[in-house]
Image (cartoon, helix red, strand yellow):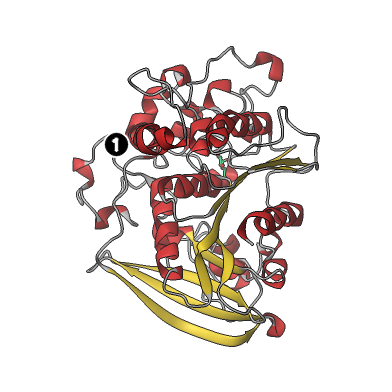
Amino acid sequence: MLDPMLIEAQPKGYNYEEAKVPKYNLPDPLVCLDGSKVKDADDWVKKRRPEVVRMFEDEVYGRSPGKPKAMRFEIVEKEADALGGKAMRKQIVIHLGKGEKALAVNLLLYLPKKAKGPVPGFLTVNFLGNHTTNKDPAIRIPTSWVRNGNGTKNNKATAAGRGERASRWAIDSIVSRGYAFGTIYYGDIDPDFHDGYENGIHPLFPPKNPKKRKPTDWASIAGWAWGLSRGLDYLETEADVDAKRIAVMGHSRLGKTSLWAGASDERFALVISNNSGCGGAALSRRQFGETVKRINTSFPHWFCDNYKKYNDKEDECPVDQHMLIALSAPRPVYVASAEGDRWADPNGEFLSALGAEPVYQLFGHTFGASKQPPVNKPVQGRIGYHVRTGKHDVTSFDWEQYLNFADKHLR
Ligand code: GCU
C-alpha cells in the first residue's frame, strides 16, 4: 500500500477537466426505495432518512456499534489559566473497552474563560496528535501510533511536533469568539493503516475476530466518526459546554469523517467538511480527481467491503455524496473546497451541497447558490459553501467562515 501521506496532491492518470466528466444521473434523495416521493419533512424524517442512512452504512462506511457500556471519562489535567489567560484547559481520557485491547482516547478541550454559562463549541479530529494543534507545552503527547512521529520513522510522537499543525487550528480566534474548542487525535481511535482490523477500535466490538467480518461491518472512517460521538458523550457531562450546540469539523479524510459523524449522530448541531473530496462531499459519479476505485485501493481500510463493489461502477451505487450532505438536514452544514485541491473535486463538492438542497427545502431552508460561487466568496444559507484560493489545507480563512456560520446558527 502507498504511504497515504506521500500520495501527491494530484496524481497523474485521473481526470481534472470539467469537459471530460461523464454524463451521470444522481439518485433522487426524495424518491423512496418503494418508488414513492417524499411529501414533506415528516416523510423524510420517518421514512426516507432511515433508508438513506442504512444505504450509507451498508454500501459505504459500514455499520457502527452504538454507545458502549464500557466507557469511562477521566479528567487527567486541568488548568484555569491557559493560552495566556484566555482559556481554561482540560484534558480528558475516554477509556474504551477492557483488557489488553482497551483504548485511551485523549480529548483536549479549551473553554473561553470569560463565558457566562455553557458555551457552544467545535469538536474536531486531528491527524498528528493533540499536541500538534497548539504550542501549549502542557498538551499531552499521544502514545498510540502516529504517522512517522514528527519526521522520525518510528511511528511515535515526540515533543518536537508541538504546534507543528497550529496553522490549521484557529484556537485563539475560536476561544476569543466565545466557543469551546475540542480535539481528538484520530490514531487514538484507530491507527490509519490497513492491519486487517486487528488494532484500534474494531476488535473491541463484534465481530471481535476480523475473520468473521461482514461486508457491511464498519471500517476506519466509521471508527473515527464513532470516536467523535464519544467525544460528544463527554461534552454532555461538561457543565461549561452546551452539548446541544456543538459543530463537528474535520479536514480531508477527517472531513469525510465529520460528515459521517454528523449524518450518523444527530446530536451534532452543525456539520463542517473541509476539503473532504472523494467519499466525503464530492460526487463520486463525476469521476473527477480521486475515484472510488483509487480510494478503495490506496486506503482499503477506510470504507466497508461493500464499497469496493463500486470500483469503476459509481453509477451502480444506490447513493451519491449529495445524499450524505442531505443527512445533516435540517441542521446547518458547511462544505469548503480549495481551488488548488483538484484531487478533491471542488466543483463536485459544490454540486453535492446543491444536490442536498431539496431536502433542506422540505424544512423551509435554502442554500443561496445555484452554481459554484467565485473563489473567496462564501455563500451562507442553511447550507454554507466556499472555494478559497490555495491548496488542500485548513486556513484561517476557512475558520473565519466557520465562525461566521456558527455565529449565525449556534448563537
Ligand atoms: C489522500 C486521499 C484523500 C484524502 C487525503 C487526506 O489524498 O486520496 O481521499 O482526503 O489523502 O486525508 O489527506
Tag 1: residue type? Thr
Q: Residue furthest bottom?
A: 80
Above or below: residue 267 compared with residue 307: below
User: What is the crowding at mark 1: few (fewer than 14 residues within 10 Å), some, or many (at least 20)?
Assistant: many
Quadrant occupied by the C terminus: bottom right
Q: Report which quarter residue 139 is drawn in.
A: bottom right
Above or below: residue 293 compared with residue 131: above
Residue with the mark numbered 1: 216
- The structure residue drawn at horizontal position 55% and vertical position 14%, both measured from the top left corner, is 24
- Mark 1 CB near ligand 1 (8 Å cut): no
For residue 244, side relative to residue 120 (left or right): left
Above or below: residue 406 compared with residue 390: below
**Residue in front for this viewpoint, 368 or 295:** 368
Residue 297 percent across, percent down from the top left: 44, 32
Q: Report which quarter residue 308 is drawn in.
A: top left
- The structure residue drawn at horizontal position 44% and vertical position 82%, both measured from the top left corner, is 76
- The structure residue drawn at horizontal position 69% and vertical position 85%, both measured from the top left corner, is 85
